[in-house]
Image (cartoon, coloured by chain):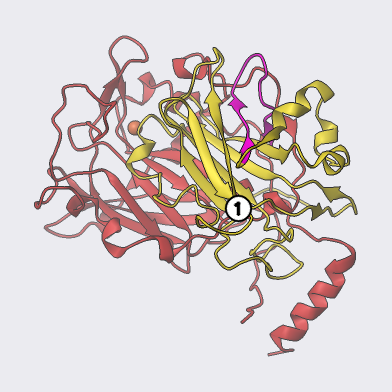
Chain colours: A yellow, B red
Amino acid sequence: MKTEAPLGLTPSQTVGPYLRLVLPWPDGPDVVPEGTPGSFVLSGRLLDGHGDPVPDGLVETWQADPAGRFNHPDDPRGAASGPASFRGYGRCPTDDDGRFWIRTLKPGPLPTPEGGQEAPHLDVSVFARGILVRMATRCYFSDEEAANRADPVLSTVEEDRRETLVATAESGGYHWDIVLQGPGETVFFDV
Amino acid sequence: MTEPAGALHARNFEATHERLDLPEYERPQGLHPPMNSPGYKSTALRSPARPLVLLPQRLTEVTGPLFGSERVTESEADLTRAGPGAEEAIGQRIIVHGRVLDSDGRPIPDTLVEVWQANAAGRYRHKVDTWPGPLDPNFTGGGRVVTDEQGWYRFTSIKPGAYPWGNHYNAWRPAHIHFSLLGRAFTQRLVTQMYFPDDPLFEYDPIYNSIPDPKVRQRLVSRFDMEHTRPDWALAFRWDIVLRGTGRTPMEEPHED
Ligand SMILES: [Fe+2]
């Protein structure tokens, strides 16, 4: 259990308008390399409280591999079984239309400590000028209806807002918009 | 020492096969700025109107990308030599260094630290920065370093200038360097800014002052570090970064090969 921490945490500040100086990587959107069997593109737009595109944002994703494993010491089930080229992490700056994309594989479902199962999902971070603290959300998949119905996180979200967390299958991949505020506002999480 | 790593691993796996034992990261209250901070106008349309939903920390949250030295070249630690021109950047040379730790005091080794900043005149090499401060052909303003085994990072740059911005009449940002840290888990991801001691612009800056607790704001201010200045070459500033911890007692982790 958490007791008094000996060191004071560093507070957050905005990423500002000039993140393009270093944060975009040439291979940033490639969670897997182009041509990886089973890979698809997840894309969408980042929109503000007026429905206008956010052209100076950064969207990051983190996910399990198709077997539901993480190549990370805190996944107690052991090493990932996915392809070596699978990075799990995607990073894409938004363009003038607020558009972002990643190339990835669908993650597997995950066991929970309580004995349940989480539906396939990505954890997503959003940064931009005017965002003082990283905004965290999740992206699920529209063609995982049964798994989504049983997902312990989606079930804590008001029913009429759940669809903001679900990417829609379309030809070649999935579409998912992130709305920072207002009508259709994406559900953001306290992580 | 005691038993082979393989046996330990097998035992751990067996024990966790029944129940996942995951670290639990602290959830800071009142630390960060409120998302909607009226003094900083750009937050008005970019902050959620609905309350955040509590997300339990499960596998996706307690893991994260572990990027280290493979994404960095040594030259990226010197911003004074990274510009498109062939010469050294103009400005007061500085060494910026410190440690990346978690709040339990554990160093975070081999983790990527990305930085970016304005030049000595306060101008960014970026198409949307158009105020009439001079550009320096020898300064790009981006750098990357990786922490060592004890969590230390270090880079060389020039001291950035203050710059005007459109938030309110005659608004100037205090001199700062932007930092991006991945840490070792999704819960630890942090983007922030480092400031310099005794900046007269602090009291006027709505971004610095968006942090509710004045004592917490000061955690973003580096300190002048005489000991690490380089004689006849550069000043030095020390700034430690503390990411969320788990409250687990610091201990040697078993090595697995
Ligand atoms: Fe800045």
Tell me residue B116's x, y (percent): 33, 42
Using a 10 Å C-alpha cutoff, classify the residue at mark 1 as few (fewer than 14 neighbours), some (14 to 19) or many (20 or more).
some
- Queried on whether the Cβ of the residue with tag 1 lies below 8 angstroms from ligand 1, the answer reads no
Residue B187 versus residue A155: which sits nearer the camera? A155
Dividing the image into four equal quarters, which quarter contains ligand 1? Answer: top left
Q: Chain of mark 1?
A: A
Residue A122 in the image: above or below residue A82: above
Q: Is residue B70 left or right of residue B1?
A: left
Tell me residue B219's x, y (percent): 46, 40
Tell me residue B32's x, y (percent): 57, 32
Amino acid type shown at disc 1: Ser
Count the labels in the image.
1
Residue B136 in the image: above or below residue A89: above
* Quarter-of-image position of residue A24: top left
Residue A76 part of the magenta-drawn span:
no
* Image quarter in which the C terminus of chain A is found: top right
Residue shown at the point (54%, 12%) measured from the top left: A50
Report the magenta residues as a range.
A173-191
- Looking at the rendered structure, the secondary structure element under dot 1 is loop
Task: Determine if residue B19 is in view.
Answer: yes
Residue A89 in the image: above or below residue A75: above
Residue shown at the point (69%, 69%) measured from the top left: A81
Residue B209 versus residue A154: which sits nearer the camera? A154
Q: Is residue A58 left or right of residue B188?
A: left
Residue B241 in the image: above or below residue A183: below
Which residue position is annotated with label 1?
A39
